[in-house]
Image: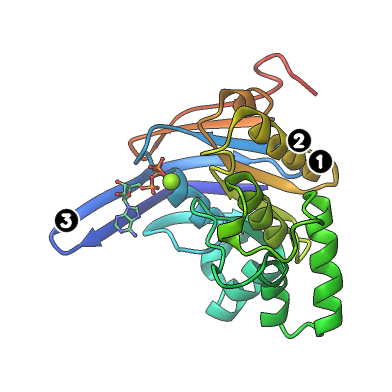
Amino acid sequence: MIAFHDVHKTYLMGETRVDALQGVTVEIPERRLAVIMGPSGSGKSTFLHLAGCLDTPTSGRVSYNGTDLGTLSSRGRADFRAKSVGFVFQKFNLIPNLSALRNVEMPLLLQNASASDARKRALDALATVELGDRIHHRPSKLSGGEQQRVAIARALINDPKLILADEPTGNLDTQTGQRILLLLKALVEKGKTVIVVTHNPEIAESADALVVLRDGKVESFSTSEGRGGHL
Ligand SMILES: Nc1ncnc2c1ncn2[C@@H]1O[C@H](COP(=O)(O)OP(=O)(O)OP(=O)(O)O)[C@@H](O)[C@H]1O
Ligand SMILES: [Mg+2]
């Protein structure tokens, strides 16, 4: 379980102070699909960054299976990110001059995996997202949905327990969005914990847990049981 306890996140930019999260307390179940919704600027990406240990709260606690992430050393945090978290960023963050295959291999190579092992696993991950026939394409030669799937393959490459996806269907047509949704659900069936930020009501509908943020606060939290269930 990922638990947020009275989490505040304040960004300071010169004179300007933004209270992006203001006392968020919520428990995200494991091995489930959780969805974060809310208007632009409500703190969704900030929430995801804190859940994935990419950033630290200004105050409050984020814990993963009872371990307070705030007590980890910077090495411990880096380890947690590398081994347990797969992040699909709001803006894909693919490296433009590398092929799909090289983009997906990169996290493994950075962790000193052997070139042959990295290649094999990257090919597997690209096959999982049904991009086996686009492995030599650079991001600019791929459609938005294909780029998104490369980003998902890259997030899966370390076989992380926790997959965090920031608007993975953001600019995609309904059919492509549907495919990404099926992919995320398949990951949950394989035992992964998936947290998705989305504006897509269809994804929200099929979530096991739904957090709605507004102005940095939890406006509502519901589970599929509470909404009549779906699984
Ligand atoms: N690194 C930062 N420095 C300063 N302010 C920030 C930073 N990141 C986010 N903010 C501010 O914090 C607030 C919450 O941002 P966040 O990115 O979490 O919103 P969001 O819900 O993901 O919005 P969107 O739907 O537009 O992606 C916004 O007002 C934003 O301007
Ligand atoms: Mg965002």
Looking at the picture, tell me which residue is in the foreground, 208 or 57: 208
Q: How far apart, in angstroms, are the residues tagged by discs 1 and 2? A: 6 Å
| Residue bearing mark 2 | 182
Quarter of the image with the C terminus is top right
Q: At label 1, which amino acid type do we have?
A: Ala
Q: Residues within 10 Å of mark 1 (few under 14, many from 20)?
A: few
Figure check: 118 above or below 84: below
Q: Is mark 3 within 8 Å of ligand 1?
A: yes
Residue placed at 83% from the left, 65% from the top?
123
The reply to whether residue 66 is visible in this rendering is no
Figure check: 175 above or below 6: above
Figure check: 90 above or below 140: above
Colour theme = rainbow
Q: How many marks?
A: 3
Q: At label 2, which amino acid type do we have?
A: Leu
User: Which mark is on residue 186?
Assistant: 1
Q: At label 3, which amino acid type do we have?
A: Thr
Looking at the picture, tell me which residue is in the foreground, 199 or 177: 177
| Residue bearing mark 3 | 16
